[in-house]
């Protein structure tokens, strides 16, 4: 359907993603508008779910729940009732039908839209200039208006650039990295920390989709225009700004851009004592929420507006630890325990422990210690007993801290307390619906319990929150859509060459699908990344002279030798024996892993498919305490 059209009394403008009536305009996400357009093209007809999914999400793996949420949002905008529908009918087991007349919009613009257009024509048009210049000019302009830095305690200059009808509703938002204007690279930790904490604050709002840190940090120092960034991230609103720290004072300048039109909606500058930085963050988050007119529950309002005084030095030590933690992740973007060197771990934990020492009542550093341990190359038995008290302390200090609940969920999962873990994951997501770590960990939990479709749903949500990373890889892998998984893992290996993880996953897939030469090649690539170059060379020599089975036997034996000096998981050695059909050796090593409680929660992983039909595997699943239904879901 080309152009604007009317659905009963509503004016629908697909190019603007708006639905309007009687002077009120509601903006919906592009995919939701796509669903409405598809229904309108077939008004009065039943449109099958499959047709809607193909039309709106042609290149994306989505489940029915995504479509249900889109229809639910349309009904909300139209004031429609699913049970007594006047507009969109649900046809059970078939699809949906638009039951109201659809007509092309006439050429006459309604009065309220003409007013809005006139306002828009008066707005300053912002050119897609370099982001760094743009933020710098904003900071300079506001600094001139306030008469210089550090002369006023609380400067609030609010430039409202949209009048009359107010700013547009924004349902999705990206907070770009705040620029460090101090000129001192050693202050990057402070600007990055402020960015992350602002994202954390806004992630608590259930009606707002906030893009994850891992995606937005890719635009640090980017020259891309804001509309281009918004398109890549799939958002309507963008926050950009800067941080300037001078002595014991700090100034934050921020502006909100309505990305589809690259127009400023709001801009403001704040100055505070460093001691009041947490209050400043809370004020900024609340102001942004008001500016985008996001709906907040009373609980969310209380959360986003609350803060507790924290020792300044403790907060700085925490930000230092957070910076070290993220620097290592950003440099390698690894997903397994060997992403940190021992030196990086010690430095990171040292910063968090200093924060705890300076302010024992500050919850985040306790979770930071757990996070650093969890990413360390140390076996879980060496740090897990110390992690639980840390996380319990964080929960006692702040039960509304989503990351503490996520940490506890992971601890309970390692203890095979499946019900307790799920409760904590769900609580973490309830407290922070846009927390990508919570969705990512929960999807892994669901896959590991064999609840594959639920895991796929979480991955879909995660992809929306972290669009610059391939969050659907696990969905393809666990559903054994190996061709798609191979494509994405190859892409990941190219973009993060220092990451061994995609090579390991590719070697597993190739082993499972009988592509032995490629499996060995990926093992060589993995060992080269891990600096086991001699082992990588031995793999190639042995395969060429003795074949696949003898090569993996040699590989397993060498791994056992290495395990005497460094951490090599028992379950990993078990998987190697499984790939060549040596089930006795595989189960012997799985038994060692069971006794060490090391990664025995991931028995749904396809790498165990060669062992799954053996009664010993079912026995292992039962001993780990997985729900009885898991055995059925894992059966082939």
Image: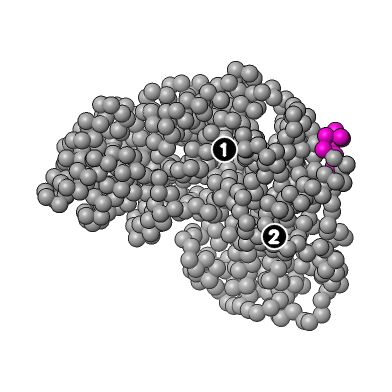
151 inside magenta stretch: yes
The correct choice, above or below, for 577 with respect to 207 in the image is above
Is there CB contact under 8 Å for labels 2 and 1?
Answer: no
Between residues 52 and 571, which one lies in front from this camera angle? Answer: 571
Between residues 383 and 423, which one lies in front from this camera angle? Answer: 383
Disc 2 vs disc 1: which is toward the camera? 2
Question: What color scheme is it?
Answer: one colour
Residue at which label 2 appears: 129
What residue span does the magenta drawing correspond to? 149-157
Q: Position of residue 518 (x, y in %)?
A: 25, 55
Between residues 314 and 603, which one lies in front from this camera angle? Answer: 314
Q: Position of residue 105 (x, y in %)?
A: 74, 79
Whether residue 136 sits left or right of residue 464 in the image: it is right
Q: Position of residue 56 (x, y in %)?
A: 55, 68
Q: Secondary structure at mark 1?
A: helix
Query: Counting residues from the N terminus, which is met first, the one under dot 2 or under dot 1?
Result: 2
Residue at which label 1 appears: 428
Residue drawn where x is 34% and y is 43% of the image: 529
Whether residue 114 sits left or right of residue 621 in the image: it is right
Q: Secondary structure at mark 2?
A: loop
Residue at the left extreme, as displayed: 546
Quadrant of the rendered image containing residue 192: top right
């Amino acid at each position: 359907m080309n152009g604007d059209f009317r659905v009963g009394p509503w004016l629908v403008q697909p190019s603007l993603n708006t639905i309007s009536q009687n002077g009120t305009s509601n903006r919906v996400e592009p995919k939701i508008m796509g669903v409405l357009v598809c229904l309108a093209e077939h008004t009065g007809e039943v449109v099958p779910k499959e047709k809607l999914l193909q039309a709106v999400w042609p290149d994306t793996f989505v489940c029915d729940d995504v479509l249900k949420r889109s229809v639910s949002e349309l009904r909300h905008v139209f004031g429609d009732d699913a049970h007594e529908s006047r507009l969109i009918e649900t046809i059970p087991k078939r699809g949906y039908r638009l039951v109201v007349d659809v007509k092309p919009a006439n050429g006459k613009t309604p009065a309220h839209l003409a007013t809005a257009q006139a306002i828009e024509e008066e707005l300053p048009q912002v050119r897609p200039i370099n982001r760094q210049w743009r933020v710098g000019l904003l900071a300079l302009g506001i600094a001139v208006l306030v008469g210089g830095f550090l002369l006023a305690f609380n400067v609030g200059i609010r430039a409202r650039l949209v009048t009359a009808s107010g700013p547009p509703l924004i349902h999705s938002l990206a907070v770009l990295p705040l620029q460090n204007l101090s000129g001192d690279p050693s202050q990057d930790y402070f600007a990055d920390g402020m960015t992350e904490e602002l994202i954390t604050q806004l992630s608590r709002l259930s009606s707002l989709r906030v893009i994850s840190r891992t995606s937005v940090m890719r635009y640090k120092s980017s020259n891309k225009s804001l509309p281009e960034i918004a398109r890549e991230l799939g958002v309507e609103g963008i926050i950009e700004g800067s941080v300037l720290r001078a002595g014991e004072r700090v100034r934050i300048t921020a502006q909100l851009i309505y990305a589809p039109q690259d127009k400023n909606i709001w801009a403001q500058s704040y100055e505070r004592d460093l001691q009041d930085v947490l209050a400043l963050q809370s004020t900024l988050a609340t102001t942004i929420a008001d500016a985008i007119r996001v709906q907040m529950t009373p609980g969310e309002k209380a959360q986003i507006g609350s803060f507790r005084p924290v020792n300044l030095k403790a907060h700085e030590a925490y930000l230092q630890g957070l910076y070290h933690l993220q620097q290592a992740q950003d440099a390698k973007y690894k997903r397994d325990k060997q992403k940190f060197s021992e030196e990086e771990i010690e430095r990171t934990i040292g910063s968090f422990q200093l924060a705890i020492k300076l302010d024992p009542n500050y919850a985040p550093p306790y979770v930071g210690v757990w996070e650093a341990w969890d990413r360390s190359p140390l076996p879980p038995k060496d740090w897990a007993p110390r992690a639980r008290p840390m996380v319990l302390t964080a929960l006692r200090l702040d039960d509304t801290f989503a990351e503490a609940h996520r940490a506890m969920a992971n601890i309970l999962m390692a203890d095979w307390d499946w019900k307790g873990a799920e409760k904590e994951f769900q609580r973490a997501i309830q407290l922070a619906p846009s927390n990508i770590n919570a969705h990512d960990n929960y999807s892994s939990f669901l896959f590991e319990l064999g609840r594959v479709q639920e895991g796929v749903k979480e991955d879909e949500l995660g992809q929306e929150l972290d669009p610059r990373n391939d969050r659907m890889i696990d969905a393809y892998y666990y559903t054994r859509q190996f061709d798609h998984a191979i494509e994405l893992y190859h892409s990941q290996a190219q973009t993060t060459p220092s990451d061994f993880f995609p090579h390991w996953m590719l070697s597993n897939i190739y082993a499972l699908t009988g592509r032995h030469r490629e499996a060995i090649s990926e093992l060589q690539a993995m060992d080269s990344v891990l600096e086991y170059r001699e082992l990588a060379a031995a793999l190639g020599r042995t395969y060429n002279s003795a074949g696949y089975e003898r090569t993996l036997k040699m590989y397993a034996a060498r791994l056992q030798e290495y395990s005497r000096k460094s951490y090599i998981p028992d379950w990993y050695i078990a998987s190697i024996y499984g790939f060549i059909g040596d089930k006795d050796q595989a189960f012997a090593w799985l038994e060692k892993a069971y006794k060490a409680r090391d990664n025995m929660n991931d028995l749904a992983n396809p790498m165990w498919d060669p062992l799954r039909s053996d009664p010993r595997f079912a026995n292992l699943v039962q001993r780990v305490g997985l729900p009885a239904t898991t055995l059925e879901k894992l059966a082939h």
